[in-house]
Image (spheres, coloured by chain):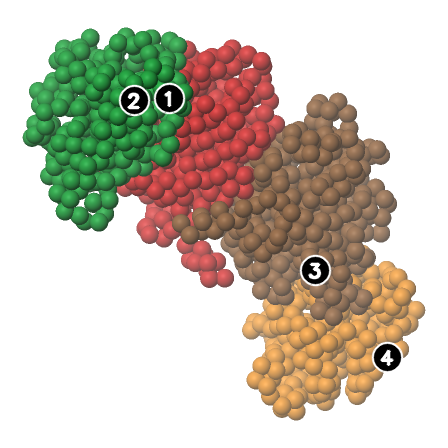
Chain colours: A brown, B red, C green, D orange
Amino acid sequence: MSETVKFGQYGGQYVPEVLMPAIEELTDAYERYVLDNEDGFMDEFRQRLRDFGGRPTPLQYADQLSEAYDTAVYLKREDLLHGGAHKLNNALGQVLLAKYMGKERIIAETGAGQHGTATAMAAAHLDMPCEIYMGRTDINRQRPNVFRMRLNGAEVNPVTVGRGTLKEAISETMRDWATTVETTHYVIGSIVGPAPFPAMVRDFQSVISEEAREQIRDHAGRLPDSVVACAGGGSNTMGSFAEFVDDADVDLLAVEAGGSSLTVNEQEGVAPNSATLSTGDEGVLHGARTKLLQDSDGQIMESHSVSAGLDYAGVGPELAHLVDEGRVTPANVDDDAALEAFHRLSQEEGIIPALETAHAFGYLHENPDAVGDVTVINVSGRGDKDLETVIEETEQRDLDVDVDMSVFEAAEGM
Amino acid sequence: MSETVKFGQYGGQYVPEVLMPAIEELTDAYERYVLDNEDGFMDEFRQRLRDFGGRPTPLQYADQLSEAYDTAVYLKREDLLHGGAHKLNNALGQVLLAKYMGKERIIAETGAGQHGTATAMAAAHLDMPCEIYMGRTDINRQRPNVFRMRLNGAEVNPVTVGRGTLKEAISETMRDWATTVETTHYVIGSIVGPAPFPAMVRDFQSVISEEAREQIRDHAGRLPDSVVACAGGGSNTMGSFAEFVDDADVDLLAVEAGGSSLTVNEQEGVAPNSATLSTGDEGVLHGARTKLLQDSDGQIMESHSVSAGLDYAGVGPELAHLVDEGRVTPANVDDDAALEAFHRLSQEEGIIPALETAHAFGYLHENPDAVGDVTVINVSGRGDKDLETVIEETEQRDLDVDVDMSVFEAAEGM
Amino acid sequence: MANNPDLAGAFERDDPAFVPYLAAGDPDYEASLEYVEALARGGADVIELGLPFSEPIAEGKTIQDAIVRALDAGMTPDRYFEFVAELDVDVPLVCMTYYNLIYQYGQEEGPRPFVEKAADVGITGFVVPDLPAEEADPLREACDEFDLDLVFIVAPTTRGDRLDRMREQVSGYVYVQARLGTTGARDDVSDQTDESLARIDDWDVPKAVGFGIKEGDHAARIVRAGADGIIVGSALVDIVAEGYENDEPVSAVADRLEAKARDLKEGALRGAQQRAESVVPEDQ
Amino acid sequence: MANNPDLAGAFERDDPAFVPYLAAGDPDYEASLEYVEALARGGADVIELGLPFSEPIAEGKTIQDAIVRALDAGMTPDRYFEFVAELDVDVPLVCMTYYNLIYQYGQEEGPRPFVEKAADVGITGFVVPDLPAEEADPLREACDEFDLDLVFIVAPTTRGDRLDRMREQVSGYVYVQARLGTTGARDDVSDQTDESLARIDDWDVPKAVGFGIKEGDHAARIVRAGADGIIVGSALVDIVAEGYENDEPVSAVADRLEAKARDLKEGALRGAQQRAESVVPEDQ
Ligand SMILES: Cc1ncc(COP(=O)(O)O)c(C=O)c1O
Ligand SMILES: Cc1ncc(COP(=O)(O)O)c(C=O)c1O
């Protein structure tokens, strides 16, 4: 992969001038340490990912799903990574890079709280002070992660602007960075933001597909017909796709949050989904030109998804480009189908996925014929953080899976 | 390891006659499938542990702890196992064995809920119906695990007898088993119970020390001076020790819950601790002769620990034997020290441990000179299940670590 | 092995034994004395007297609750021995308890002190639900020394080798567990009973059937099927529990226990008569 | 590159420019018109008129809130152009907004339609905080075509190559960011200002300093340090916000804005006088 600034017409560096020198410094550090392994950076990174993070994560053949969908379903188990999601691959890489760069402080935004906890863990591990910005709405729906960040010694700063989700948290973190840029590194949580972030985060996350590609050859004796991953910003997505991009016969399926509907409300500025790749159009947000959920004037819409980690109006520029090129196929799965898939995976395979991840399985359920004979699905994270949300959201619905919510109520009353 | 029934004077099979045939059947299955790998049982088990469970787990050098205690501290990361604790090693082994034996239903008891979730996950994975017995007190202090079991499709049966903790849950599960023994396998959660359970569970958990012994040679170029593990029933303990038992120079340290005090209240029948190895004496409970917390008449005491998973009046017979032999050194750490260790590991290493696990780190903190130059500490589980308990218990105390609880309160109010 | 003539002698072919169980000290020491004596008056041939243990893994909810009541009211092994000594009944008493209490008693290791003391206060034998034949040698030896019987339980799952091992060890009577599970009164009679009895048909100790017997008609049915006695626990404990919950006078509860005992004993006798009248039991 | 004489001409050595900022449409269209006109009356030489964007990453809390008020009251790019057309002021107007609004406007791709329309309604130049020199070519070209200026921001962190790149592109004036961070009124004056001004001392565009200027004395201090103008936003928006929150009459708020503008403009003039009187600024 040699793209580091632009991906076709997407990408770039649309940030306040005050940040540009830091971005140049980061670009330089990225090229030296990450791309050229200067001072053995990548070796140390890989070693820490192994010993602290628990890599490699397994590729598991899913007995029940394979039978149910009559296709060989392999699960890439990023839920087993330390912290419970793929997010650590990136967070650890960036915090370590900040250390190599001589930075003294870490800031990050978080949506589901997974990137925040991953960053807080990595910062504790590498002994760096750390502050996390998180929207108030997300704080409320992902409380366990707030506690975890705090237990790891990170400050958590609630962001109350707008709807209080990921978009606002990113803006606020950029503001902090504009003030503290000389000593602080901003650990962005997905393949978004100004260059070199999208390329750098992709490179840190590519370990997913690097391992998966080797593992599927071992397990299935061949490359898969498809790779499926959910897409919020798209870091687990590009991490899962990267090493397969050159394998023209492998379909790459990016599953976004269909939310409650694909129809936008221009009047209110609300898109009740986060299906940026399928429904968004080109614009500039958070430092990059990419596909966005925006109104006809270019104002950014409030997005929605039952899963906080997909609830974002933008998407990584590289993914936008690969969709335009036809290399990546965008898809989306709505809240109901994601919840059903959550319960299904929990009951059938004994894996409680993150609500974000559940979207990938919702896609499989709705399109079993689209994935070919052998598919790799990235289990981007585990669902411990989502228990309360799932209980609440399930109670409000009449789902197509057999979930006995009375047992939860009984437990509540105990 | 060749002991399967007795360990010195400990062990045996003290169960109702109705269960004896099942125990004989299990002994036979254990010998054939586990010890002799009949039908490739052990191969399948190892493969599923790898692909579903995420083995091997890493052995990690702990930078900050090593510096703080001036000793090379290595962490065996069982917290990274699927489900978040070492418990899956055993649960997966037993559920798979039940399948080989043609059983149709799984029951289990659980204390912290970790064995219950591990069993529920394994049962979902292997497509077996599953019911879990759990004390009412434990249900209240480990709610996330109750939800996880239910999400995995397991029934959770509250046990209201007595104080409603692990001891009562085990008794109740045995009663279920006495009724359903022909079709049901009882997946006991630690190295306790009648033979062959203690030996069999040890064998399933030995993978911990099998890996750790090889890993420490790779990392440190030598065997450790000590291995430290917390001990409730003792399964992570014996799992961590088993392959080191014959290495006479490796000290084996079993850290029990000192609870709030080591002084027992005979009148009330309460031992405010679970320090069975240090303070208990010989007796018969739950199918085995072992060390127990009991009054002078032989009535079993109610034990106590801030960590549900250590809160048990008995202990594995093999551990009791190894303590008598002088091979294993018992120790204990009280509630306060365990909580402090919980916060310390979270802040210093970016690993939020289970409260059970925290006891092992409390020991290290209080006895840094007792572990030698190189020590392996088993991180038996992660602390996601304990967040609420830790917040509550920390608020009630004046701990010796810097924990700013106000941030939690702020988050509560959000 | 010991074979106390009192115990085996309580079971006669045409006068099958009625063996009630109560937990000693339930709901308190004094009331419990009255209740046990009422059972004797009602026709008990042998009494199984429970010494409460904190972890009664073989008991269903009814007897668990009885044990909790007795423990809360202060029952201990020493009080139990006083209780037995004080009881005014002239039928053999079998001590039913769990092994840890037997094992812990006295200064010396092992079951001997407990057995010695039990013999001393007038206990005739033991039933220990968590002590299978495999682990029974030490207790068996102590029983032999003091000439007490050791009753074993044959479960529906007990077969082959296990039966042989038990047959060697058992004395007094054999406790035939009528069904899978734990103690507790049921409304049906299990087919497993017939099968179990058939398996041990040629044993020379009396066969007493227990687990789930609730009424005289059940008792009759079981005796007809070949039992030499019936063991009834939960159905009697239910009466104690009801009296306790409703705060009834001890004498009223004792009267009901006596009446219930009479019903059960009569059922057993009826069964023996029916068995004598037809070679093939009518409903087989 | 374009160099609109109106804009650069507003900055004179002995009459330094006072450049106030307000968000157009804050708190509503009508009031906002009054407020902007009040600033002109108070002595504004150039007005930076914000077109609100939903993600103002370079703004501090004060201006973020202004933007939310304006958006809630219905401000859009088209309304903005109407607003500009309707404004009765005779100083140059600079449009301050984020790139996405410029980029999205009109049917055609790219910034040209927006720039054309802006020129049409009387805008003189642009400040686009999220558009660094690296990404500015398309906008620069459109500006050249319609003879509008493109102002760039020099930050305290801008050095070396970056300065050169910007120097080539900038026209109208250069916006010297007085401190790190986002917009917002502060109580101190940053040393970084002096250093930034020194770094671009030989540039031939006027240098206007902004970020954090709150009072006439600050303005004087900055002009003394060599600035050709001062840019003030948050301190003025604070007055709008206060009026909005207290539901004050528009005219009262407008009066306060005018007074504040006068204070700032006088401060700037005072600074220029002091600078002229001493070759070395007194407090260096
Ligand atoms: C488990 C999980 N999966 C996916 C995502 C979405 O992020 P991305 O699309 O960058 O992988 C998140 C974000 O929080 C997440 O927590
Ligand atoms: C994380 C963890 N560690 C330790 C234990 C104690 O069990 P054992 O002593 O059998 O390892 C438990 C029991 O629930 C546990 O969850």
Percent across and percent down for residue C149 are 19, 15
Residue type marked 4: Val
Looking at the rendered image, the disc whose residue lies closer to the viewer, 4 or 3, is 3
Looking at the rendered image, the disc whose residue lies closer to the viewer, 4 or 1, is 1
- Residue visible at 65% across and 39% down? A379
**Mark 3 falls within which chain?**
A
Percent across and percent down for residue C6 are 14, 16
Looking at the rendered image, the disc whose residue lies closer to the viewer, 3 or 1, is 1
**Mark 1 falls within which chain?**
C
Is residue A199 or residue D185 the one in the foreground? A199
Q: Would you identify the image quadrant in which residue A369 lies? A: top right
Residue at the spot of label 4: D121
Are discs 2 and 4 both within one chain?
Answer: no
Is residue B355 or residue D278 the one in the foreground? B355
Are discs 4 and 3 both within one chain?
Answer: no
Residue at the spot of label 2: C274
Tell me: D63 left or right of C211. right
Callout 2 secondary element = helix
Q: Would you identify the image quadrant in which residue A267 lies? A: bottom right
Residue type marked 2: Gln
Residue at the spot of label 1: C282
**CA gap, disc 3 and disc 2:** 79 Å
Residue at the spot of label 3: A272
**CA gap, disc 4 and disc 1:** 111 Å
